[in-house]
Image (cartoon, grey):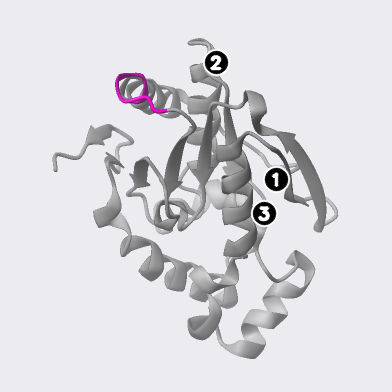
Amino acid sequence: MLGDILLITEKHEKAGAKIIEHILANQKPKMIIGISGESGSGKSELAHVIAKGLRKHGIFAKPLHIDNYYRILPLLRTQWRKDNGIQNVVGYGEYDWDTIYRNITEFKAGKVSTGPCVDLVTEQVDQLTTDYSTVDMIVVDGLYAIKTEGVDLSIFIELTYHETKKAQLVRGKEPQNEYRMAVLEQEHQMVKALRSKADILISMEYEAEIVKK
């Protein structure tokens, strides 16, 4: 998203280094990496660290932020959620999965692709064009990213919204009012159900742990 604030720290670099090591040992052509976690848990930071770190190994990886793919425009979303009931609409169905999968298919085929990109300053949705012919991997990050079909490596961050309130405020997320807390709790319930899909867990201490299956 345009204008997003990244708070990259040593913990992101450390976890990212271990994940990159695992990726290099299990690399596939046109690989898709998914990162799920709650608001403020460091999904975008980790995606950035992984993508930038892979460049050192001659691998071009591009972050794909699922928050760009909400079906309801940012300026309308709060009222839409209130009108339709937070527990009824907050979840997987808020996202335009058809466009997500179209962009992923275009990545796999090495085509030029156009997809949404939210400008956080204006809260408008722009269109971003990407030439995937030279992109080796995509790093899909978002609340429900590891639910995406075709993900080759699933990463789950265990931090919940209770631990990430400070990060949310610093990054300019919505105020911590009753509405926002209800949204965070609903997202929490939806995200935690995806934990079992993880190949790598990022612990509360932000240690990367490979899941034995």
Q: In the rendered image, which residue does mark 1 sit on?
A: 1
Left or right, 8 with respect to 77, comes to left
Between 137 and 201, the one nearer to me in the picture: 137
> Residue 77 appears at what percent x and percent y?
70, 73
Quarter occupied by residue 125: bottom right
Of helix, strand and loop, which one carries label 2? Answer: helix
- Bounds of the magenta span? 23-28
107 is higher (above) or lower (below) than 80: above
Nearest to N terminus: mark 1 or mark 3: 1
Residue 55 — which label? 2
- Amino acid type at mark 3: Asn
Badge count: 3
Q: Residue at x 30, y 37 (%)?
A: 205
Nearest to N terminus: mark 2 or mark 1: 1
Q: Quadrant of the N terminus?
A: top right
Q: In the rendered image, which residue does mark 3 sit on?
A: 68
- Amino acid type at mark 2: Arg
176 is higher (above) or lower (below) than 79: above
> Residue 184 appears at what percent x and percent y?
48, 67
Q: Residue at x 28, y 53 (%)?
A: 197
